[in-house]
Image (spheres, rainbow, N blue to C red):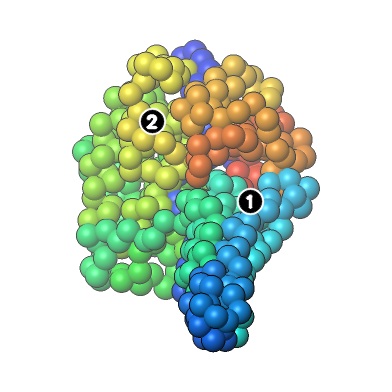
Amino acid sequence: MHHSPCPGVCAPFATKPLFLVAFVLAGCAPSAPIDGQPGSGGSGPGGAAVFGSGGTTGTGGITGSGGTTATGGVSGTGSSVGSSGGTGIGAASGSGGVTQGSGGSGTGGAGTSGAPGTGGTSMTGGNGGTSAGGRGGTTITGGRGGASSSGGAGGAGGTSTPGTAPPNPSAGCGKANPQVGSSGSPLMISSHQYYVKLPTSYDPNKPYLVLFMFNPTGNPLSWAEQNAGFESIGAKDAAIRVYPAPLSMANGWGASDVSFFKPLYDQIVATYCVDKARVFAAGESSGGDFSSILGCEHANLLRGVGPCATKNVSAYPLNATTRKCTGQVTPVVIHGKNDNVVGVANGPATRDFYLALNHCGTTTQPVAGYTDALSNCVQYQGCDSGYPVYWCQHTDPNYSGTNHGWPAFAAKMLWSLFSSY
């Protein structure tokens, strides 16, 4: 894929393990706990154990031994992280191990003559090993505590952690035959051109993941559709792809384009059936700069971003303390280890910006399926739940051997992650 280098001097820009393209898992709902059957009571002539609650002493009879307190069940342990050689990326590559939490059954108390009541059973924890983005591998829902059996305490529930968000349908749902435009006959919004590719067999009543892809400087509007790779993978059938152009093709994406994104977003969600919980953005070169900027300025509208080959944009410094971001995203920051067009410094700077925003630790884990030198992706550990940071410092020689282009692995890796949310 060829494109002209960014004009001017390109400085470093913060990396995000998710390049912004706007895209988007599912939890297991717990079943109702089983209540215990009450004990029928002890057989002492003067008294009996009442519902296995410890048994009162019969006035002339045998002291009811009462029931032992139900243990309540061990909390669901949730899913363990499947190693598969590294963190799995969604369902597409290295899904990780799947281990459900056990959630033991607590035994209820039993009277001397009564039948033991069964304790509450904790529901099992989440399903699935760790997946890229964190949601596929987090425990979907904690187990519910079981009902207290007679004489016993209720089962303790498993720990609850965030799972896949439910779909958030947009106002465009239900609108048939929307205009989509094309690279040769684009639509317009706020003086910017754009066009849309709908999923195969588009259903206007089904909310879809959306991916915005921003092209590099000096390339035609059709560049992203023809070169980014989303038209030849699962995104073609399952996502709404939006291909916009900067105000100036020659100058590329910059600070002056930021105000156009909200009108574009509003137009997309009003026209098409969008799942607003799963909107992603990505881009390359100046398009990467732009997707990274949006990951802070419009984090409230995006779930994740995938900035690639970025440079410094002075109007939007990579300072997590001074920037007033509108929320958090999952970033996949992609940068050439030997980029000789914009240099190598802005990749790590972008990565560190998102590490600070998402409160990540310094430990990393290789991403299964993307460990070779042409991808070299890792996931940072200890980040805020649901917002991991991915860093891919690759050596793909794309773009005339400059290591500045859109690497071959990018579309597949981003789609595997985004579609797992």
Locate residue 388, reporting x and y percent: 55, 39
The type of residue carrying mark 1 is: Thr
Q: In which quarter of the image is the N terminus?
A: top right
What residue did someone put label 2 on?
Answer: 296
Disc 2 to disc 1, how far (Cα)? 25 Å
Quadrant of the rendered structure where residue 298 is?
top left
Which numbered disc flags the more N-terminal residue, 2 or 1? Answer: 1
**Which residue is at 32% across, 33% downward?**
326
Q: Which is nearer the eye, 124 or 108?
A: 108
Q: Which is nearer the eye, 415 or 163?
A: 163
Locate residue 185, reporting x and y percent: 31, 52
Locate residue 103, reporting x and y percent: 62, 64
| Above-or-below relation of 93 to 37 | above
What residue did someone put label 1 on?
Answer: 130
Q: Which is nearer the eye, 269 or 74?
A: 74
Quadrant of the rendered structure where residue 97 is?
bottom right
**Which residue is at 36% across, 35% downward?**
327
| Above-or-below relation of 384 to 143 | above
Q: Which is nearer the eye, 239 or 116?
A: 116
**Which residue is at 41% across, 36% downward?**
328
* Local secondary structure at mark 1: loop
